[in-house]
Image (cartoon, grey):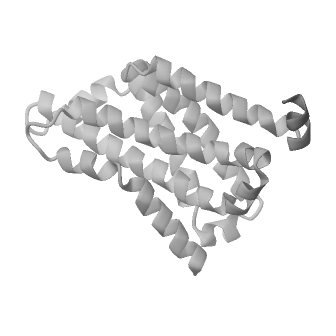
Amino acid sequence: MKRRAALVALWAVLMVPLIPLWWHGFSPDADVDALVAASGNWAMAWLAGAIVMTPLARLWRPLARLLWLRRAVGLAAFAASLVHVWLYVRGMQAYAEPGGEWALMGAEAFTPGIFTGWAALILMLPPALASTDAAMRLLRSAWKSVQRLAWPAAALALAHMAVVHDGFRLAMAIIAVVASLQLARFFSVGSIRKAL
């Protein structure tokens, strides 16, 4: 019970930066493009954070006891992605006749930048749904395979960020950090300390 409360609390804390973005999304004077980009950046940050927790725990062993919190970080990434999509719909409403935003979204859905975003969201859905205790018990050993969908989701989200939101430099920086930390999986903490 304490763990569940901690997961909910951490998820709520991680969602705090999204609250003003969501709130401003209702304003008719809002810079929706900026809100869409900001919400996407937060979603990417939490997704990358969930992915790097394991290699970070390898570098700093005390973190291993907190890996169970990774579930809240991943769910925050998915929730932030939903806010990102909602703001995107709001942005489309600004360019379309009433009710015409869906036609606009459909028209650009298969362009590379937008398609990668939708594909990333779809791949994030199974891990999100499989994050309950009941789903973990039901899936058993297959649970890890479902959670590994976060990797292609992250790759697609980075491509989306680089193409659509002019975030090429930020995307490359995230890739460099994640790749460096993943390389830590192949080295023991002792060997790294000796190298330093």
Using the rendered image of the protein, determine whether residue 37 is visible from the camera's viewpoint: yes
Q: Is 85 located above or below residue 31 in the figure?
A: below
Q: Position of residue 2 (x, y in %)?
A: 58, 79
In the visual, does 102 lie left or right of 162? left
Residue in view at x 43 percent, y 32 percent: 117
Q: Position of residue 193 (x, y in %)?
A: 86, 37
Q: Is 90 located above or below residue 3 in the figure?
A: above
Q: Nearer the viewer, residue 151 or 184?
A: 184
Q: Is 98 located above or below residue 80 in the figure?
A: above
In the visual, does 39 lie left or right of 112? left
The quadrant holding residue 3 is bottom right
Q: Nearer the viewer, residue 102 or 20?
A: 20
Q: Position of residue 81 (x, y in %)?
A: 41, 44
The quadrant holding residue 150 is top right
Residue furthest to the bottom: 1
Q: Position of residue 104 (x, y in %)?
A: 23, 28
Q: Is 73 located above or below residue 24 in the figure?
A: below
Residue in view at x 47 percent, y 53 percent: 76
Q: Nearer the viewer, residue 110 or 17?
A: 17
Residue in view at x 21 percent, y 34 percent: 32
Residue in view at x 40 percent, y 48 percent: 80
In the visual, does 117 lie left or right of 104? right
Using the rendered image of the protein, determine whether residue 110 is visible from the camera's viewpoint: no
- In the rendered image, the quadrant that contains the C terminus is top right
- In the rendered image, the quadrant that contains the N terminus is bottom right
